[in-house]
Image (tube, helix red, strand yellow):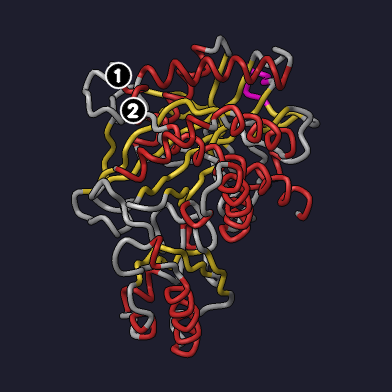
Amino acid sequence: MKFLNQIDKIVLDNIDKINLWINEKKLENNLPFYTSVDLRVSKNKIAAVDTNIFPAGFNNLSEKFLARAAEVTIEYKRLKHKLKVKKVLIVPELHTRNRHYWENVLSILKILELAKIETRVGLVLEGQSESEFEFEAISGKKLIAERITRQDDRIKLTDFDPDLVLINNDFSDSSPAILSDLEQIVVPPTEVGWHSRKKNIHFEFYNKLVEEFANLIGMNPSHFLLETRLVQNIDFENKEDRAKLASEIEQMLSSLSPEHVDNQPFSFIKSNTGTYGMSVIKITNAADVVNLNRDGRKKMKVSKGGRQIKDIIIQEGVETIYSNKEPVYYLIDCELIGGFYRTNNLRGSTENLNTKGMDFECLCGDPSHSQCENFIHPSLEIIAKIGSLATGYEISYLMKNN
């Protein structure tokens, strides 16, 4: 905790300068409506190891954080849309069996209702005759969703014509035509789903921003950088391809500064598109990739939805000081609304926690969540904002190039 507390103090001593820099960056890019940022804190490094443009864990936020989210949403509506947004249509994933996911949607509904916005849920469906569906969340609460229809350049439900379409679906396969070229506001753009997002592009923007941040506060950027390398056209069934990947891993591990590695350096290999904890393997010895067993090869062949994996990123591993948990911070319009810890009693401090056995707990560890906002670390807030800013640049890049 010593390092984290030191960075907190440096951030607070420079907060006016940092906020001015962040506000300048906000004006330069296409900020997403919301983001969630997975953070890793070691004895000498703080890094945003993943940033989600379509976050799906709002149900893990305390009531205080949901109320804060509503306040920020009201300000977003005032600043970005001159209070013209009165009706919002949420377009969710189709996790019909994932009751935790529907609890997340209910939490988003609650935020928007607290912000005095009329909200409904609409589904992008093909080949089904039903027009209305009922889903049950883990709490037992029911949620009604309807089929979306399109008329000219607007989408709507039977008796609901939204001003803004809020996407909570990462569209891993493609951007559906029904949501393209709408006259309504669509946030985030469907064109930046995981069918087009690439992790290496995101981390190029992230690392550039944390270098600027580090220079701003007079620190070595290595305390915040996350070394990330792209290796393309890898077939894990091909031993030569695995050897090629192993060579890149060996080079990266040897390049990591001993000053910023707690113990033995390690890395993760991941799909270059969204993972949801899938297609992620920890590597401490490059030779392990060459000798990857059948289960490991199978794990790295396909990602969500059965998509074939060809492009891999090798990413520096960051050990967590929290033993088996990591902070996850949530933002709206690049403003922090709250967070929680992802915990996993089946995993250790150097492992991927976003996998079987994970659970979530309040930042303060208090079941009443009465003081949760006091456990936000200033340094983690800024790194989370940088992760969110990086997605803004990423969105601008994708919209321009796609």
User: Given the image, on which type of amino acid does mark 1 rest?
Assistant: Gln
Residue for point 53% across, 54% down:
221
Spot the residue most to the top: 116
Q: State the image coordinates of residue 326 (x, y, percent, origin top left).
A: 33, 45
Q: In the image, is 8 to the left or to the right of 165?
A: left
Q: State the image coordinates of residue 274 (x, y, percent, origin top left).
A: 50, 55
Q: State the image coordinates of residue 273 (x, y, percent, origin top left).
A: 54, 59
Which portion, as a residue range, is magenta? 156-162
Q: Is residue 24 above or below residue 277?
A: above
Residue for point 28% across, 20% down:
369
Q: Secondary structure at mark 1?
A: loop
What is the number of the mark on residue 375?
A: 2
What is the number of the mark on residue 180?
A: none
Q: Please, what is the dominant secondary structure of the magenta stretch? A: loop
Towards the viewer: 35 or 233: 35
Q: In the image, is 393 to the left or to the right of 166?
A: right
User: Given the image, on which type of amino acid does mark 2 rest?
Assistant: Phe
Q: In the image, is 156 to the left or to the right of 108?
A: right
Graded by Cα atoms within 10 Å as few (under 14), some (14 to 19) or many (20 or more), the crowding at tag 2 reads some
Towards the viewer: 319 or 150: 319
Graded by Cα atoms within 10 Å as few (under 14), some (14 to 19) or many (20 or more), the crowding at tag 1 reads few
Towards the viewer: 110 or 179: 110
Q: State the image coordinates of residue 360 (x, y, percent, origin top left).
A: 28, 37
Residue for point 36% across, 48% down:
41
Spot the residue most to the left: 345
Q: Is residue 289 magenta?
A: no
Pointers 1 and 2 in contact (C-beta within 8 Å): yes
